[in-house]
Amino acid sequence: MAEFHQRSTRLFNDTSSAPQDSLQGLVLLYPHINILEIGNTVVRKDYAAMDTFRILSGGPSGHEPMYSGYVGRGMLSAAVQGDIFRSPTTYEILNVIKELAYKNDWGVLLIIQNSSCCALNFGLAVEKALTEGIKVKCLLTTDDCSEPLMPQKSDQSQGLTGTIITIKVAGAMADGFAACLEEVLEYITELQKQMSTVLLVLKPCSLVLEQKCLCTEVNATLGGDLRSKPKQKLKCLSANYVVEEMFKELSRNVLLDPGSEIVVMINNMCCSTLEENIFISEFLKKFIAMNINVQRIYVGTFMTAVDLQGFTVTVIKSSEELLEYLDYPTEAPSWQMRNFGIETSIQTNIQPRIKVLSFPRIIPKGPSLSERESNILLLVVQFACDALISCRKQLDIMDSEEGAGDVGMKLEFVANTILKGLKESGINTTNMFAFFKMLSKICDTVNGSLGAIYSIMFESCANTFGNCDCDDAIDENLWLECLQNSHIALKSYTQNEDPAYNMLAPLIACSATIQEQISLDRVPILQAFENGVAEAEMAAMRTTIKHYPDPGAHAVGIWLRAVYEGVKFRCQY
């Protein structure tokens, strides 16, 4: 029951629309930014005309004012956010990158917190953008120095509020000092080594993910003072209902008719910035609809009471004399100034200049397999998929020890989707660029980090073949390069995880063993592959912490073994 009441005191209209509602409130307050019609994205209004590279950041909603609150001259060009505590999708990120890169020769710099939630989806979007020839670079911030069992800050550290400082420095260098993308990236990369953040949590955040209106059995009240008995108990806590009731109260004392000129103060008492922006949006839309001119608006925390959560709204009839007094400078530290009013109409969101695609059409490029080689690939893929399907229950049991118990289910879904695609001729098994792009696309539909990890791996494989000429030979060296590039790409986007205890371990062990053995010139490639798979299986077993090895690592050993058996079977005939 306590959990229910905690959730029911969120001032949302609807949990699913809260991020977009919040961004609408933000852009109403600040006329230099607007919403871009790609996911939950805020951009500088002048982003298309900037004469420097663009800076993009983003991540889950629910951490406001991160990330959209830092969009503007001298900081971010754009910020893309997902749902509450969920990363934006890969294709939302990719489309924003493409929009920022459109007719832009300077490039796009991503500054992202080093966490699995952000790094994987943003990293996959970067890999896809590179495939399309876009100039894009990515920095993962690593300022957290409080990771358990970590003697000192490293590339595995996650990004915290040092991300904001990094964005500020990068934005200043770009806008104020005309630095190029490469110079800025080099500087802020070094900056990570000189930056540390420690996090103290006294009360953990709430996971408000229910897709419904939180409008029942609430304890919210209206009126009274900070400590005495309230005047009115509210029957509903949707933001638009609450604002309507507060507006009625305000109208009893201040004449709020069309054409009125007013000054507004909105005082936030310990509510989240997400809720604050939604609350602001509802109030300002009400003023705009009634043609009331807000000449000054002050938003922030001006007065609080211990443990009290809520808002106060103050409305004053405006005059030239009052504005003069309000605008007079002060050194009082808690006076948060906004010496301008708001737009007199709701802004129209910015339409992208690019064609926004969820899944872009795959155009084959680079070398292709012969008919015989294509048949071998087809059998190998069937072997790998069948192996993963048969091991679904085993992988789920392993994953339940530390995770959600669904690794096997997710890989079974991927395997069945691939088999269906092969049966329906929806997967190109001749051109390797197109083949791996399709596998990446399939994995990208799987929720969570597992789908993003495999999608990045296959995207890297596609890039390896796509960067080759059409007449280049597809030999053991190119396949080995493909395997090596895949684990290098994964490692760059999973810096906050120890590669010895996840699926990177068997991938690295396999490629290192094959590389070592074929360099000797005395070991046949098939034998080197078998030895590499054996090393991968042992590396997967070494990921065991309690009773089971890491399920992701174990799965790699399973499909690597299946791939080897398929190649061996075909090459015998």
Image (spheres, rainbow, N blue to C red):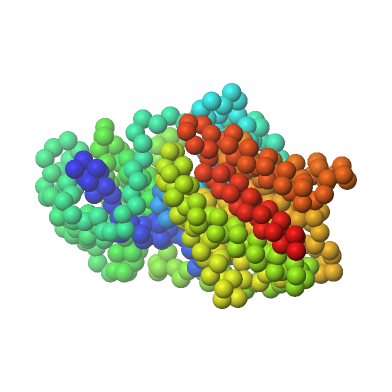
Q: Where is residue 148 in the image (x, y as percent from the top left)?
A: 51, 27
- Residue 15, quarter of the rendered image: bottom left
Nearer to the camera, 305 or 516:
516
* Quarter of the image where the C terminus is located: bottom right
Q: Which residue lies furthest to the top in this view?
A: 151
Is 385 drawn above or below residue 225 in the view shown? below
Residue at coordinates 48% horizontally, 60% vertically from top-left? 413
Nearer to the camera, 11 or 47:
11
**Does residue 213 appear in this view?**
yes
Q: Position of residue 465 (x, y in %)?
A: 75, 62
Nearer to the camera, 292 or 101:
101
- Residue 364, quarter of the rendered image: bottom right
Residue at coordinates 11% horizontally, 40% vertically from top-left? 229
Q: Position of residue 150 (x, y in %)?
A: 56, 26
Is 214 drawn above or below residue 98 in the view shown? above
Q: Position of residue 452 (x, y in %)?
A: 55, 54
**Does residue 91 appear in this view?**
no
Residue at coordinates 76% horizontally, 56% vertically from top-left? 479
Q: Residue furthest right?
A: 521
